[in-house]
């Protein structure tokens, strides 16, 4: 229970207008972009919107003294329920912390506040000729702080890696209000434990990120897009494998199965050739037109060796945009196919990609449910989407069994539960299977040492 006295102290820290306690205002902070249902028990007692690390620190001192749960929040674009305040308390929104603190061109680094939108980080760097590559599908509205907290991925991961590959240092407020700084601008840094990587992907359970130092790279001068249609899913996967083995690394390599293509076709009123079973969309980048043509020619040659039915190399920016519109509209198209979409996120070794998709197709047949499969084939990250109606108890039971078996399939081929969405609430039941009891206990020991009262984002990960 947050008393009126505590509320008054918090309002004195962040300003009265930035500490909200009416039910209707707090309701908007009780859910996120996951399929976790909205429940009144998840409405926070207080929404706090600090503007600086010092304010976050003072709020945490009070919360720690009083044992008040605190759930950090960015744009609530997470897909696993990570920003849902399961135990009420404070929803700590970082949406007012949106500034670029420093742009260091000489060292190719940028320091930003956590509430800045990811696409704004990209655009700020791009305007100065530099490149921040991670591009999660939500990058137009997700925040960079949320991306770091979840270690978000994106379509460019096959060539450029994920968020953690670009985080050089952090400012973090711990559960007791202590402010620490990790990492720095030195490229080589092995002083002590790597706390930067520990907090990256910790889902707001170990500390609240209030400042982020990111490295940037030179912006590729040119890009182009290829779309390839295959008669068999294996042909598409083999093309990606052969391409990587021969040293051709596209910026993106996105795969869509037949169900995904039918969803897009229905959504955009298009026809799909009945002979097509899978589609691959790739982006290549480089410094010259010759670079792009050389890469496209090599990819096309490899695709023809794997029975490709059709190759389209974009001849203009408009054609490129039209191809990418198919992929970027995919999530909405699949979501429109059923009352409920259980969108999952598993990651497997690249060579296990075809086998994993076959296992998922067997699960689809076993439970008589439509499961669309698409994902970042170049890095082994799949997004199986189980289409169902959870309002029907029998169908809901089959859907949950199907999800159980999808995770089991990922683990059986040496994969893991998440490539970019984190564990949050929705994957808690599976984490011991993935990490083992000793592994989970080790995580809990780290949590205990940094947050002994367990007030930071309780109920997540395990």
Image: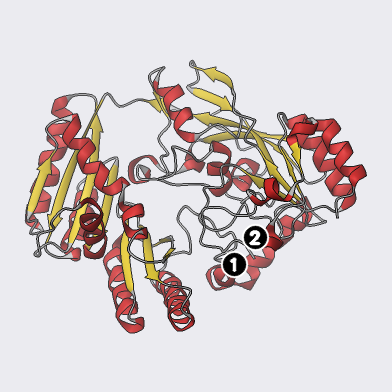
Residue found at the very far right of the displayed protein: 5
Where is residue 420 drawn, in percent x and y? Answer: 47, 52
Q: What kind of element bears circle 1?
A: helix
Q: Position of residue 194 (x, y in %)?
A: 63, 43
User: How far across and down, in percent of the image, does residue 253 sit?
Assistant: 27, 48
Label tally: 2
Locate the N terminus by quadrant: bottom right
Q: Label 1 belongs to which residue?
A: 428
Task: Please say if the residues under marks 1 and 2 sit with CB atoms less than 8 Å apart.
Answer: yes
For label 2, the SS is: loop
Residue 301 seen from this side? yes
Q: Residue at x 85, y 48 (%)?
A: 64
Q: Quadrant of residue 100?
A: top right
User: Badge 2 is on which residue?
Assistant: 460
- Local packing at callout 2 (Cα closer than 10 Å; few below 14, some 14-19, many 20+) is many
- The relative height of residue 326 versus residue 262 in the rendered view (above or below) is above
Task: Tell me which residue sits at (34%, 59%) in the image.
Answer: 336
Can you see residue 177? no
């Amino acid at each position: 229970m947050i008393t009126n006295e505590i509320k008054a102290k918090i309002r004195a820290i962040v300003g009265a207008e930035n500490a909200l306690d009416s039910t209707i205002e707090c309701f908007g902070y009780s859910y996120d972009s996951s399929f976790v249902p909205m429940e009144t028990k998840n409405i926070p007692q207080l929404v706090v919107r600090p503007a600086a690390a010092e304010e976050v620190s003072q709020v945490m001192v009070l919360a720690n003294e009083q044992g008040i749960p605190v759930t950090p929040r960015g744009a609530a674009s997470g897909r696993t329920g990570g920003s849902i305040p399961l135990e009420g308390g404070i929803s700590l929104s970082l949406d007012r912390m949106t500034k670029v603190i420093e742009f260091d061109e000489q060292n190719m680094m940028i320091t930003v506040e956590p509430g800045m939108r990811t696409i704004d980080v990209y655009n700020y760097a791009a305007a100065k000729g530099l490149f921040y590559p991670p591009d999660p599908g939500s990058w137009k509205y997700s925040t960079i702080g949320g991306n770091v907290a979840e270690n978000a991925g994106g379509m460019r991961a096959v060539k450029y890696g994920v968020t953690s590959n670009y985080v050089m240092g952090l400012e973090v407020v711990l559960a007791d209000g202590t402010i620490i700084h990790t990492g720095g601008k030195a490229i080589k840094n092995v002083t002590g434990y790597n706390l930067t990587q520990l907090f990256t992907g910790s889902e707001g359970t170990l500390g609240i990120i209030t400042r982020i130092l990111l490295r940037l790279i030179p912006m590729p001068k040119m890009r182009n897009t290829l779309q390839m249609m295959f008669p068999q899913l294996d042909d598409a996967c083999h093309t990606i494998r052969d391409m990587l083995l021969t040293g051709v690394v596209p910026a993106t390599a996105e795969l869509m199965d037949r169900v995904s293509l039918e969803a897009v076709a229905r959504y955009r009123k298009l026809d799909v050739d009945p002979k097509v079973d899978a589609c691959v969309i790739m982006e290549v980048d480089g410094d010259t037109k010759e670079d792009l043509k050389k890469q496209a020619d090599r990819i096309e040659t490899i695709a023809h060796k794997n029975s490709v039915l059709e190759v389209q190399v974009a001849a203009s920016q408009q054609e490129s945009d039209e191809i990418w519109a198919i992929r970027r509209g995919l999530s909405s198209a699949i979501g429109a196919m059923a009352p409920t979409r259980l969108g999952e996120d598993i990651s497997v070794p690249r060579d296990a990609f075809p086998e994993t998709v076959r296992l998922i197709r067997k699960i689809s047949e076993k439970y008589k449910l439509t499961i669309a499969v698409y994902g970042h084939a170049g890095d082994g990250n799949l997004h199986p989407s189980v289409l169902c109606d959870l309002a029907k108890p029998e169908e809901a039971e089959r859907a949950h069994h199907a999800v159980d078996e999808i995770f089991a399939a990922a683990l059986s081929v040496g994969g893991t539960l998440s490539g970019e969405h984190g564990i949050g609430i929705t994957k808690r039941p599976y984490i011991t299977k993935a990490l083992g009891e000793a592994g989970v206990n080790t995580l809990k020991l780290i949590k205990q040492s940094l947050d002994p009262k367990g007030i930071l984002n309780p109920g997540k990960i395990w």
